[in-house]
Image (cartoon, rainbow, N blue to C red):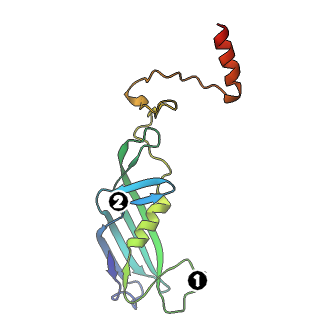
C-alpha cells in the first residue's frame, strides 16, 4: 500500500486519511508459521507535525497458525496499532532518531505493517484454553480421547530402579 504525502509535506498540521489493504506474505517468526488468509485492513492517518510525518493506524485481519499444544491449524483474529514517525531522507535526520526514512513523496507502508505485526504477535496461540495437547509418548491428540499410554512421569534417573521393582512384583 503506497501513500502519496505530497499534499502534506510542506503543510504544518496537514493530514491524510488512509484506508486500504496490505497483502502480507506467510511469515516464519521464532519457529512459528503465520499464514494470512486475506489482506490486512489498515485504517488511520498520516499527519505533519512540522518535524516529521506521524503515521497512526489500526490493522485488523485473520491469520492461520498452529495451536501450541495440539498442533492443529487455527484461525486467529489480529488487531494491532501502528504509531510511527516518518521523515524524508534528505540527510538532515540523524540515524539515531527513531524515524523511518522515505524517499520522494510516496511511502510504501507494507514493511511498516509487517514489522509492527511482528512486534505485536503473541508468542503462542491455543485452539482453546483447555486444550490437552499431544501425548508425550505416542503423539496422539488428547483432545480426541485418551490414547491409553501411561501418563506417569518417571524421572529417567530412577527408571532402572522402577524396572527392577516391576520385575519383582
Residue at image location 41% in from the left, 46% down from the top: 66
Q: Secondary structure at mark 2?
A: strand
**Looking at the image, residue 5 lies above or below residue 112:** below
| Numbered circles on residues, count | 2
Q: Residue 159 in the image: x percent, y percent?
A: 67, 24
**In which quadrant of the rendered image does the C terminus lie?**
top right
Relative to residue 93, is residue 127 drawn left or right? left
In the picture, the disc for residue 95 is 1
Q: Nearer the viewer, mark 2 or mark 1?
A: 1
**Looking at the image, residue 141 lies above or below residue 79:** above
Residue at image location 45% in from the left, 58% down from the top: 28
Residue at image location 44% in from the left, 36% down from the top: 129
User: Toward which corner of the image does residue 112 lie, by quadrant?
Assistant: bottom left
Calculate the distance from the C-alpha at mark 2 to the C-alpha at mark 1: 31 Å
Residue at image location 28% in from the left, 59% down from the top: 38
Q: Residue 116 in the image: x percent, y percent?
A: 46, 65
**Looking at the image, residue 143 lies above or below residue 111:** above
Q: From the viewer's side, name the closer residue of 93 and 15.
A: 93
In the picture, the disc for residue 2 is none
Q: From the viewer's side, name the closer residue of 38 and 159.
A: 159
Q: Residue 103 in the image: x percent, y percent?
A: 42, 88
**Label 1 neighbour load within 10 Å: few <14, some 14-19, many 20+:** few
Q: Residue 5 in the image: x percent, y percent?
A: 35, 84
Q: From the viewer's side, name the closer residue of 82 and 77.
A: 77
Q: Secondary structure at mark 1?
A: loop
Relative to residue 163, is residue 37 drawn left or right? left
Q: Earlier in the sequence, mark 2 or mark 1?
A: 2
Residue annotated with mark 2: 60
**In which quadrant of the rendered image does the N terminus lie?**
bottom left
**Label 2 neighbour load within 10 Å: few <14, some 14-19, many 20+:** some
Amino acid at each position: 500500500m503506497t501513500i502519496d504525502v505530497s499534499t502534506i509535506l510542506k503543510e504544518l498540521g496537514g493530514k491524510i486519511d488512509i484506508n486500504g489493504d496490505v497483502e502480507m506474505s506467510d511469515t516464519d517468526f521464532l519457529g512459528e508459521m503465520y499464514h494470512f488468509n486475506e489482506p490486512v485492513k489498515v485504517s488511520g492517518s498520516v499527519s505533519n507535525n512540522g518535524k516529521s510525518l506521524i503515521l497512526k493506524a489500526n490493522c485488523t485481519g485473520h491469520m492461520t497458525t498452529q495451536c501450541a499444544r495440539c498442533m492443529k491449524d487455527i484461525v486467529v483474529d489480529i488487531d494491532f496499532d501502528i504509531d510511527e514517525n516518518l521523515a524524508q531522507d534528505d540527510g538532515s535526520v540523524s540515524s539515531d532518531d527513531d524515524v523511518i526514512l522515505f524517499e520522494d513523496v510516496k511511502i510504501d507502508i507494507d514493511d511498516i505493517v509487517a514489522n509492527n505485526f511482528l512486534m505485536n504477535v503473541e508468542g503462542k496461540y491455543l485452539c482453546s484454553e483447555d486444550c490437552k495437547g499431544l501425548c508425550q509418548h505416542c503423539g496422539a491428540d488428547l483432545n480426541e480421547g485418551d490414547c491409553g499410554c501411561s501418563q506417569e512421569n518417571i524421572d529417567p534417573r530412577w527408571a532402572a530402579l522402577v524396572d527392577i521393582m516391576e520385575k519383582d512384583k
